[in-house]
Amino acid sequence: MAKRIRGLGGRSIGGSQKKSGQMGELLKQAQKAQEEMESLEEKFKELTVEASAGGGVVKVRATCDYRIESIEIAEEIHDEGLEIIQDLVLAAVNEALSLVSEKRNEETSKLTGSLGIPDSML
């Protein structure tokens, strides 16, 4: 058994095998969580969301790593003013980014739930 030394304030320092075993387990869990998060980041590159504006005349597809893959503008609004088209594109992009955030939170919650780690820890 390890020798215990009295520290300042009357607390013992050293000598606890139980604490080092718990610390080792925590480190293993942290490493597993880090590996899972790296895997999830790769998955985000493949996950896509779609958003639209103006009743579907502007469509935006984005990956969950916050990259816009495509923007489609229907022929029927090509004669509209530039300002209207810009507003619709902006609305669709903002909606797509919002959906990306929701999807990322959902997938991250699945991961943290399976690891027993609060979302705030990652």
Image (spheres, grey):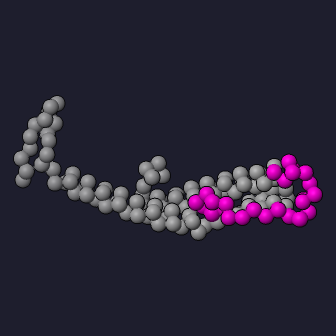
In front of the other: 10 or 86: 86
Q: Is residue 73 magenta?
A: yes
Q: Is residue 121 in view from this perspective?
A: yes
Q: Quadrant of residue 34?
A: bottom left
Whether residue 33 sits left or right of residue 28 in the image: it is right
In front of the other: 64 or 84: 84
Residue at figure coordinates x 20%, y 54% from the top left: 20
x, y percentage for residue 106? 57, 59
Residue at figure coordinates x 76%, y 51% from the top left: 90
x, y percentage for residue 100? 63, 57
Whether residue 46 sits left or right of residue 52 in the image: it is left
Q: Residue lying at the far right in this picture: please name it.
A: 79
Whether residue 27 sits left or right of residue 40 in the image: it is left
x, y percentage for residue 79? 93, 57
Q: Residue lying at the far top in this picture: please name it.
A: 9
Q: Is residue 103 in view from this perspective?
A: no
The boundaries of the magenta stretch are: 62-86
Residue at figure coordinates x 36%, y 57% from the top left: 30
Q: Quadrant of residue 22?
A: bottom left
Q: Is residue 27 magenta?
A: no
Count of marks overlaid on the render? 0
Residue 84 vertical position relative to residue 36 in the rendered view, above or below: above
x, y percentage for residue 52? 78, 59
Residue at figure coordinates x 40%, y 64% from the top left: 35
